Image (cartoon, rainbow, N blue to C red):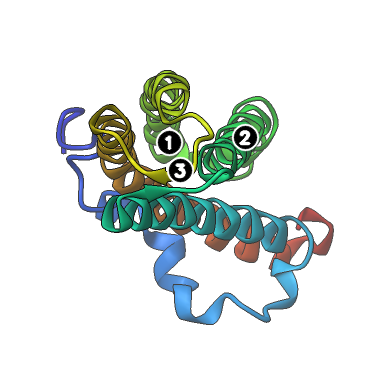
């Protein structure tokens, strides 16, 4: 697979040659494994939070579009959820890029290409984060805090934000799944040899 076919939003998972640990530790067997305690559980909990937040944001936007009405807290609630998601992703990726990924690459050099793919994902996701943050600011300013039937400008603002979220969500889900397929089996495998690794 070349770089273009490995790009987030294009690929349908990681290359097969990077899945050797995932075949030994299939996703359905992860939960409850002793080696998952600590880092692995924390990792999955963060990812579950990100998935839940993007689903909550998309659901809130869908409800606004269907009802055609806004409440006093509609914009502020969206702002809180989006800020929580974007801030959480930024912090999570910083720790991965500067601490975990280098340590994981040293622990299993055969996965170097996989971590390079995930690093490229982070750059693409952060470009998307910038777009989502800018659209959020503009859309929520236009949405305001008024209650009642939305004006046409408010509808356009909600539609614009929903369109950006709809493009961002599948990229985020794909990245989280691929990252788990690389990281969690590595944690489980290394924990067999060194229980302190997890």
Pick whichever of labels 1 and 2 is earlier in the sequence: 2
Tell me which residue sits at (64%, 27%) in the image.
94
SS assignment at label 1 = helix
Between the residue at mark 2 and the residue at mark 3, the CA separation in whole angstroms equals: 15 Å
Tell me which residue sits at (57%, 41%) in the image.
85
Looking at the image, is 135 positioned above or below residue 15? above
Residue 19 appears at what percent x and percent y? 36, 58
Q: For the C terminus, which image quadrant?
A: bottom right
Q: Residue 111 carries which label?
A: 3
Tell me which residue sits at (66%, 31%) in the image.
91
SS assignment at label 2 = helix
Rate crowding at label 2 as few (under 14), some (14 to 19) or many (20 or more) other CA atoms within 10 Å: some
Asked if the residues shown at circle 1 and circle 3 are in contact, with their CB atoms under 8 angstroms apart, the answer is no
User: For this rendering, which residue is in front, 143 or 25?
Assistant: 143
Residue 150 appears at what percent x and percent y? 33, 40
> Label 2, on which residue?
96
The quarter holding residue 39 reads bottom right
Between the residue at mark 1 and the residue at mark 3, the CA separation in whole angstroms equals: 11 Å
User: For this rendering, which residue is in front, 28 or 87?
Assistant: 87
Between the residue at mark 1 and the residue at mark 2, the CA separation in whole angstroms equals: 10 Å
């Amino acid at each position: 697979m070349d770089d273009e076919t490995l790009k987030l939003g294009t690929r349908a998972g990681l290359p097969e040659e990077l899945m050797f640990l995932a075949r030994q530790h299939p996703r359905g067997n992860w939960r409850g494994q002793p080696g998952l305690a600590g880092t692995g559980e924390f990792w999955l909990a963060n990812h579950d939070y990100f998935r839940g937040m993007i689903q909550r944001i998309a659901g809130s936007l869908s409800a606004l579009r269907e009802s055609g009405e806004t409440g006093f807290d509609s914009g502020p609630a969206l702002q809180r959820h989006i800020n929580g998601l974007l801030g959480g992703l930024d912090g999570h990726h910083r720790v991965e890029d500067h601490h975990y990924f280098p340590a994981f690459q040293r622990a299993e050099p055969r996965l170097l290409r996989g971590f390079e793919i995930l690093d490229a994902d982070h750059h693409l996701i952060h470009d998307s984060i910038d777009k989502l943050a800018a659209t959020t600011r503009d859309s929520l300013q236009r949405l305001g805090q008024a209650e009642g039937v939305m004006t046409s400008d408010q509808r356009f603002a909600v539609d614009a934000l929903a369109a950006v979220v709809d493009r961002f969500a599948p990229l985020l889900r794909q990245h989280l799944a691929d990252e788990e397929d690389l990281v969690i089996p590595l944690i489980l495998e290394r924990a067999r040899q060194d229980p302190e690794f997890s």
